[in-house]
Image: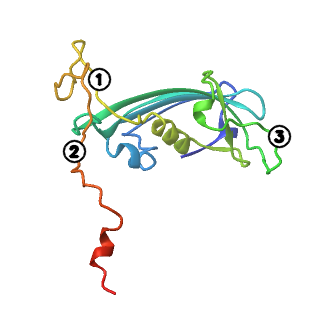
Amino acid sequence: MRLRLHDIPEEGKAFLWDRQSGELNHVLADLIRDREYTAEFFIKPINSRNFELTGMIRTALPEQCSRCGIDFDFMSQTRFHEILIPEQSEDRTGRYARVNHISDAEDSGLSVAEYAIDHTFDMGEYLHEQVALTLPFNPAPAETPAGDCRLCGVMVKGRIFSYNEEMPEEKPQNPFSALKNLKI
């Protein structure tokens, strides 16, 4: 869903997108399938070229528990605050410094996103990435105050969730044992 930024009034414009309005149904389908979502955001011009984007997206992602393997809905809520700037051309000798990896960057709460030369911003792609970034490496449901899993009730606190299969050991063979069956 592309937004035309020049159509945003001086006082800004608020948006509310959800499953019923359907703006992101196709865009988020690979992440959330048919789960409900709510995206609320506000875009306001700062000057003739830059815009401020603030908002949040709330949804549930179908996941599998990394502890017991049971399917559950991982609740995701992300807040964002961006300054939208025109797309910067960056050749191989560009002067703009970038961090090596997203984990190297500090989260200061405000960041920059670029919009296309034709003054459109792909809000659907932006929100898709915001949701995708909330996916944990090892998804697991929340725990009760007693330390039990809210999904299956298994005691989580102090338990190691790993699987170790003992492999049979083979006796080391003499490397020359193959030579005794050799006929010349």
Amino acid at the residue labelled 1: Ala
Amino acid at the residue labelled 3: Arg
Percent of width and height locating residue 52: 66, 28
In the current view of this chain or complex, which residue is farthest to the left? Answer: 153
Q: Give the spatial CA distance, label 2 vs label 1.
A: 32 Å
Task: Tell me, for residue 178, which label it has, or none.
Answer: none
Q: Which residue is mark 2?
A: 166
Q: Neighbour class for label 3 at 10 Å: few (<14), some, many (≥20)?
A: few
CB-based contact (under 8 Å), mark 2 and mark 1: no
Percent of width and height locating residue 183: 30, 85
Q: Which residue is mark 3?
A: 95
Q: Secondary structure at mark 2?
A: loop
Q: Which residue is mark 1?
A: 142
Pick the residue in front: 43 or 164.
164
Q: Neighbour class for label 2 at 10 Å: few (<14), some, many (≥20)?
A: few
**105 to the left or right of 176:** right
Pick the residue in front: 85 or 9.
85
